[in-house]
Amino acid sequence: MKKESENSVSKSTEILVVEDSITQATQIKHLLESHHYRVVVANDGKEAISKLSKHKPSLVISDIVMPEMNGYELCKKIKSNKNTEDIPVILLTILTDPEEIIEGLSCGADCFITKPFYEDHLLSNIAKFISVENRANQKKVPFGVQLFYKGEKRIIQAEQQNVIMLMLDIYEAAIHQNKMLIQTQEELRSLNERLESIVEKRTSDLTEEIKLSNEIANKLKESEEKFRTAMENSADAIFMTDLQGKYLYTNKAVTTMLGFTSEEMISMTIFDLSPQDKRDEYFEIFKQVLSKGKVFTEIELLKKDGNFISTDLNSVLLPGGLIYGSCRDISVRKHAKEELIKAKDKAEESDRLKSAFLANMSHEIRTPMNGILGFTDLLLKPDLSSEERARFIKIVHQSGQRMLSTVNDIVEISKIEAGLINVIEKETDLNERVKELIRFFRIEAEKKGLNLILEKLLPVENKKLMTDQNKLDSILTNLIKNAIKYTDTGTINVGCSQKGMEVEFYVKDTGIGIPKNRHKAVFKRFEQADIGDKRAFQGSGLGLAISKSYVEILDGKIWVESEEGKGSTFYFTLPYITEPIKETADQQLETSNKTDPARKLKILIAEDDEVSELLLKEELITVGKEILIAKTGVDAVKTCKNNPDINLVLMDIQMPGMNGYEATRKIREFNKEVVIIAQTAYGLSGDREKAIEAGCNDYISKPISIAELLALIQKYFG
């Protein structure tokens, strides 16, 4: 009847097991369920608190060492909550440190069970604490004591029964360890007896052999001399000691390795060469040689110069009460091993950051794509109001711009890593570039309630220098956008000044700041994906890495000064070079107006993508008197032959059958006058040069800006 009663209690009893180790959680769960308890598992303290807020178990069993919230903190939270203070808490601990004992007494736990635990002991404690009679009769006697530990005053508030339970657990663990020690000593004694028997038998055999033949004795003597010669000239450090560890013989390699002469070594013992804090460990190794007959391990040996050297020790107990040992220097091999571990850790960290980066990229592409596809579907609804349609179109456009920005960053970092970035220097008005960017971003800053302030510019006479304007704009854009993104209140100051033969730019904000240990990391690729702030995931995470690459390509430097919670100031420099150059075709394109050309054109669109073809056709209606379509390179060549009056060809580079480069070469064989503008979705460095080499007049990258396209048409036909 008692057994049935216990099973009934077990089945109605729910136990919460808190353990971050899947293996140990599974072990405990299996044990308890096999005794008819219902078990709920939480992987850490936070998850346990969450489960306790929804359901009240009869008992909590928790590991102590866990991430974020350890067992002590969990126990304190349970005991400080009126709804859960009566739930018994059993903590699993190894109790090897006084700090653990102090924490264990202070947290209010009902029981402490040391690891590794006995199943019967754990089950008996569970039965005791869930027993209705026990919990009803349980008297809590408070206990307080003040003690000094490691120079600090510690006050322990606990209950007497908890103190007694902890002492009993410590005592029980000591008994278990003592049993294990006795068992080990018995095994050593048995092995030693067996070894003595073997040695005795071998000694007897050798003695008998010596008696049988003087010739064999002479040969043994000769062999011994050879062995001694081999030991003396061995690259390994070889020594002989007596059973007290006193050196009887050392070879030349010992002197080479440690610096002590053979005469000096003979006056020493093996313990004289051990570190002071490892004497006991060396004594245990020596006892192992005597008891087991041999040992192979790593030890440190003292050199004459006072330093220590890591060695592999191979030691054997010989007949006649001698101990033979050999050592080999493994310093180079070790902590090589340490370099290998560091390289492995670095590779794993790099792989982790890249995985986080790829996940971020997936998010940054899928999120705007969701906006584009979703709101495009909504635009197809016939009952939309004009306001809704305009709002949806704006969202589609913004999503497209966000995705384009992400793709551009990915393409740009790929070009940087492949070494495909070209520098196109031209005379640039620095003051005007900074002013224009301030005007552009001021609206975005004001939407967040931020003041974007232009603080300092170059003197008028020094405002122009030779640099790559596009890369300068990209650097400043990334820094200003980041400042707006990570600043919630306050101001953003932007400026530049000449310092010797350099121009120094800065962007200063009052934002969240950057911890000092991440000042260099923020410029590394993929690092942003490892920042805790959720805003770090809103973007490609490549902006600062691209900016750093651009600054270094332009022979400058970039750095940050920041304090967490107090804002950041990003600085970068560029060489101050003022040599003027002739106006280039790119500058002419930038300064050309965007009005329609004076005459209507006959245009051929060579494009195999139907969407791109339709878009170009719609955008060129205002400038085209007739628009022809070719879907392959072969069709484009044929159409130009049949229509010699075509004014303009928009040539897609990637088409089936014959690509745009080859089609252009074919057209140039019979038509030198038609204007051919290459268009590509790749946007790789060198595409423009390849297009010009093939015979194209100019080049434009996708997605095509209608303003840029009309400016190119104006350039050739305006």
Image (tube, helix red, strand yellow):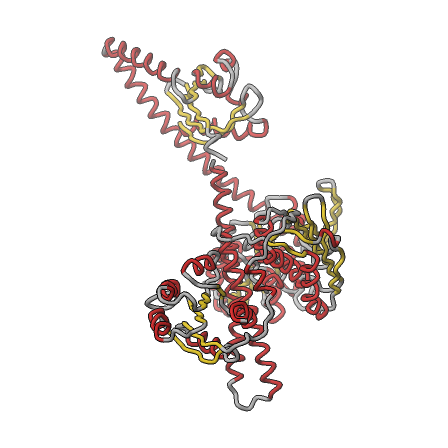
Seen from the viewer's position, the closer of residues 383 and 634 is 634
Answer above or below: position of 463 versus 280. Answer: below
In-image side of 662 versus 39 (left or right): left
Instruction: Name the image quarter holding residue 290.
Output: top left
Whether residue 643 is situated above or below residue 237 in the rendered picture: below
**Observer-nearest of 473 and 442:** 473
Q: Residue at x 49, y 17 (%)?
A: 246
Q: Position of residue 63 (x, y in %)?
A: 57, 55
Q: Looking at the image, which residue is at 53% across and 49% down? A: 115
Q: Nearer the viewer, residue 117 or 622?
A: 622
Where's the C terminus, which quadrant? bottom right
Residue 532 in percent (x, y) is at 61, 59
Q: Nearer the viewer, residue 71 or 166?
A: 71
Res 189 → quadrant:
top left
Horizontally, residue 384 falls left or right of residue 27, namely: right
Res 409 quadrant in image: bottom right
How many numbered badges does the structure rendering display? 0
Residue at 58% over, 48% down: 552
In the rendered view, would you say 552 is above or below 334? below
Q: Is residue 317 shown left or right of residue 550?
A: left
Q: Residue furthest bottom?
A: 383
Q: Could you say where residue 333 lies in the image, as x and y percent from the top left?
A: 45, 33
Q: Is residue 471 above or below residue 86?
A: above
Q: Is residue 19 visible?
A: yes
> Residue 179: x, y in percent?
49, 41
Query: Can the viewer see residue 283?
Result: no
User: Residue 241 vs residue 107: left or right?
Assistant: left
